[in-house]
């Protein structure tokens, strides 16, 4: 089941291409995240689905229905705005009841439904408060309740937590996930924050510039098996090595200039994987073991000098300079109060990793 | 912290001293004369033994139907002028604030242009438009819409038309600025929640611009009530309005006592009327 399908959608603002032939399918009943840097056109995409903007070419389907030319108020889609966009002249009740009142639902049913939905978002004590008496998090919940009370086929969320502080954001993320599980509505969540996207999404799409969809997949697939260097670099952080792929029987390795051979697992069914091809190699910083001791059992090892150490609390981030000048980025979990070995600036260290933890990317 | 509070004290004092000239001006040229007018309205002659000679006689002689008709006529003119101004100004302000993108500054400039022109000059300009052989009649005759020139000048119609145009900017400006302050996303949210344009206008846009509507309404209503230039010049001066009545008492009959009483009476009626309108507005926008 597809909740939303975008077919060759193109959008131009002031002679600037915002979305260029975007094709995207969003499955029904899922928590779907659209992740991309600012300027990637993800908000425009959301506004096209909601109907606030119209496409220059292409079409948008909601379920099986072509809604490209359906006016905003007739689309079974509701939006949670980034700045909440609550009606400042209404109290909480009237804000939430607005959609039902417009549809001329009976008064007693409206009251029943509003109370019910406000309980779900933990606002039952604030029904008759005015909007400016609420905190940011509470306003966010009103915006959420106001949208979902209309039982839309798709709920669009445009960076809904951007204005909240970190602790509250983490709490709201959990509440959003719970709400989606109860309602089973398709949620489309637009964000530039990879942490939010990875947390909430059943599946996510990574957008680069002009709305180009780089990859669609579960958070694990996106993080562990990025298909392009854009995805690898944008989601999480990574070390990218450029080199030539060599396949010798069962053993494959990437030959990196001035560094040497780094063993990898090459999936030969991919068309761009061939002996002697130029490839990129992505190695996540937390997959690397950093130590001053010699270790056994790792397929790859590099040596270098510690250039910088940044303490993050739960982990420590190192930059290690290789002899060719390349800087490798390493994350080390701080598992103990008193680390076994003390790595300091200018120390010579070994970096170990397994070949399975490397992702090969098309150059 | 300490620095901040010192700075705050300084600006507070500064603000106080800067307000002094304006307050003095108001006191000397508005409240003091107003007080004298009220005083005079209760006396029969200029002397210093005021409190011995307090009299209600001026008010008693105003207690006639013809004077109340003048006040009633002015109230009607003021109310209808404000009402028609609102009807015309709201769409103008709406499009300027929410729809127009290009030429917005030019349009705003054109709207503010009358403020740069002397009021009397504006009124005289209307002579040339509304005259028997004026611009309007010539144009309508040329287009074949009418066969006889319309008789507009020196009628109530002329007063209403010119009042409407002269007071329009006072209505447009406050509504425009209140509409500008509306969050565009709030309007989008209304559509998103299923409302059509008309529902959004009545449930969201108009209530959120209520303060502008009220400001504009009173900005037009109150000066319209006392307007005397337009009725005198374009209405032919045949029909009496509050403004022309006061002029008549003070300048023609040289009876400042009756004039003062009439001024106070009509002012009082206007305040009551404005309060009534205010209550109605509050009810409408609840």
Image (cartoon, rainbow, N blue to C red):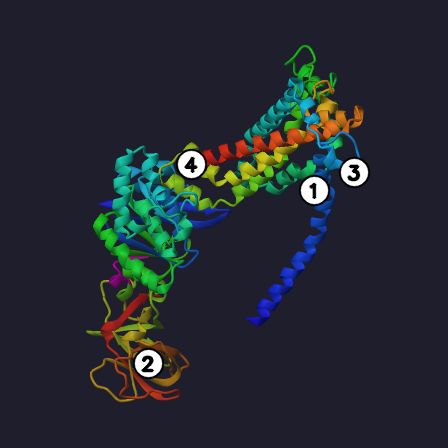
Disc ID at residue B31: 1
x then y, percent, for residue A240: 35, 71
Q: Are marks 3 and 2 in contact (CB under 8 Å)?
A: no
Q: Nearer the viewer, residue B181 or A240?
A: B181
Q: CA distance from mark 3 to mark 1?
A: 20 Å
Q: Quadrant of residue B85?
A: top right
Closer to the eye: label 3 or 1 = 3
Letter of the chain that mark 4 sits on in the rendering: B
Q: CA distance from mark 4 to mark 1?
A: 41 Å
Which numbered disc flags the more N-terminal residue, 4 or 1?
1
Q: Residues within 10 Å of mark 4 (few under 14, many from 20)?
A: many
Q: Are marks 1 and 2 in contact (CB under 8 Å)?
A: no
User: The C terminus of chain B appears in which quarter of the rendering?
Assistant: top left
Q: Quadrant of residue A254?
A: bottom left
Disc ID at residue A260: 2
Question: What SS does tag 1 mark?
Answer: helix
Letter of the chain that mark 3 sits on in the rendering: B
Asked if marks 3 and 2 fall on the same chain, the answer is no
x then y, percent, for residue A222: 28, 62
Q: CA distance from mark 3 to mark 2?
A: 112 Å
* Magenta stretch, residue numbers: A214-222
Up-down: is A219 above or below A97?
A: below
Q: Residue furthest front?
A: B52
Up-down: is A183 above or below B285?
A: below
């Amino acid at each position: 089941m597809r909740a939303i399908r975008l077919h060759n959608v193109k959008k131009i603002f002031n002679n600037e291409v915002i979305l260029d032939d975007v094709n995207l399918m969003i499955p029904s009943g899922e928590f779907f995240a659209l992740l991309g840097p600012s300027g990637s056109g993800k908000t425009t995409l959301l506004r096209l689905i909601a109907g606030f903007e119209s496409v220059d070419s292409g079409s948008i389907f909601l379920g099986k229905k072509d809604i490209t030319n359906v006016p905003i108020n007739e689309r079974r889609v509701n939006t949670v705005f980034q700045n909440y966009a609550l009606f400042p002249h209404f109290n909480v009740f009237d804000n939430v009841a607005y959609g039902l009142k417009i549809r001329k639902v009976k008064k007693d049913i409206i009251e029943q439904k509003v109370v019910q939905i406000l309980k779900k978002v933990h606002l039952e004590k604030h029904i008759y408060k005015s909007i400016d008496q609420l905190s940011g998090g509470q306003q966010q919940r009103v915006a959420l309740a106001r949208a979902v009370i209309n039982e839309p086929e798709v709920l669009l969320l445009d960076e809904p937590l951007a204005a909240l502080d970190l602790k509250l954001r983490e709490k709201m993320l959990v509440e959003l996930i719970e709400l989606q599980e109860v309602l089973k509505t398709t949620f489309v969540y637009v964000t530039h924050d990879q942490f939010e996207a990875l947390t909430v999404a059943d599946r996510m799409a990574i957008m680069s510039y002009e709305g180009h969809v780089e990859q669609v997949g579960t958070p694990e697939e996106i993080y562990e098996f990025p298909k392009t260097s854009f995805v690898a670099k944008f989601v999480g952080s990574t070390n990218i090595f450029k080199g030539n792929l060599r396949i010798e029987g069962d053993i494959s390795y990437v030959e990196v200039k001035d560094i040497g051979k780094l063993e990898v697992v090459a999936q030969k069914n991919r068309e761009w994987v061939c002996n002697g091809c130029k490839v990129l190699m992505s190695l996540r910083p937390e997959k690397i073991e950093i130590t001053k001791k010699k270790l056994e059992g790792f397929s790859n090892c590099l040596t270098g000098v510690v250039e910088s150490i940044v303490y993050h609390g739960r982990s420590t981030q190192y930059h290690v300079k290789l002899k060719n000048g390349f800087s490798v980025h390493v994350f080390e979990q701080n598992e103990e109060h008193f680390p076994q070995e003390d790595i300091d600036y200018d120390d010579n260290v070994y970096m170990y990793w397994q070949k399975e933890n490397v992702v090969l990317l098309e150059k | 912290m300490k620095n901040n509070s010192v700075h705050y004290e300084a600006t507070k004092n500064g603000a106080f001293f800067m307000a002094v000239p304006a307050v003095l001006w108001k006191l000397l040229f508005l409240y003091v004369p107003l007080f004298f007018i009220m005083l005079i309205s209760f006396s029969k002659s200029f002397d210093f033994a005021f409190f011995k000679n307090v009299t209600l006689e001026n008010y008693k002689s105003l207690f006639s139907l013809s004077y109340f008709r003048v006040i009633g006529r002015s109230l009607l003119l003021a109310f209808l002028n404000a009402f028609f101004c609102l009807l015309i100004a709201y769409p103008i302000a709406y499009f300027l604030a929410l729809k127009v993108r290009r030429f917005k500054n030019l349009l705003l400039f054109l709207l503010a242009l009358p403020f740069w022109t002397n009021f009397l000059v504006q009124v005289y300009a209307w002579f040339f438009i509304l005259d028997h052989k004026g611009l309007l009649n010539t144009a309508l005759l040329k287009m074949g819409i009418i066969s006889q020139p319309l008789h507009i000048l020196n009628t109530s119609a002329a007063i209403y038309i010119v009042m409407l145009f002269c007071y329009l900017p006072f209505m447009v400006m406050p509504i425009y600025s209140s509409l500008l302050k509306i969050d565009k996303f709030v309007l989008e949210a209304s559509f998103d929640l299923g409302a059509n344009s008309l529902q959004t206008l009545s449930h969201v846009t108009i209530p959120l611009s209520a303060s502008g509507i009220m400001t504009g309404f009173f900005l037009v209503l109150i000066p319209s009530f006392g307007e005397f230039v337009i009725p005198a010049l374009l209405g032919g001066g045949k029909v009496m309005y509050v403004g022309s009545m006061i002029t008549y008492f003070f300048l023609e009959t040289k009876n400042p006592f009756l004039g003062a009483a009439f001024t106070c009476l009509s002012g009082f009626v206007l305040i009551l009327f404005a309060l009534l309108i205010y209550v109605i507005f509050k009810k409408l926008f609840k």
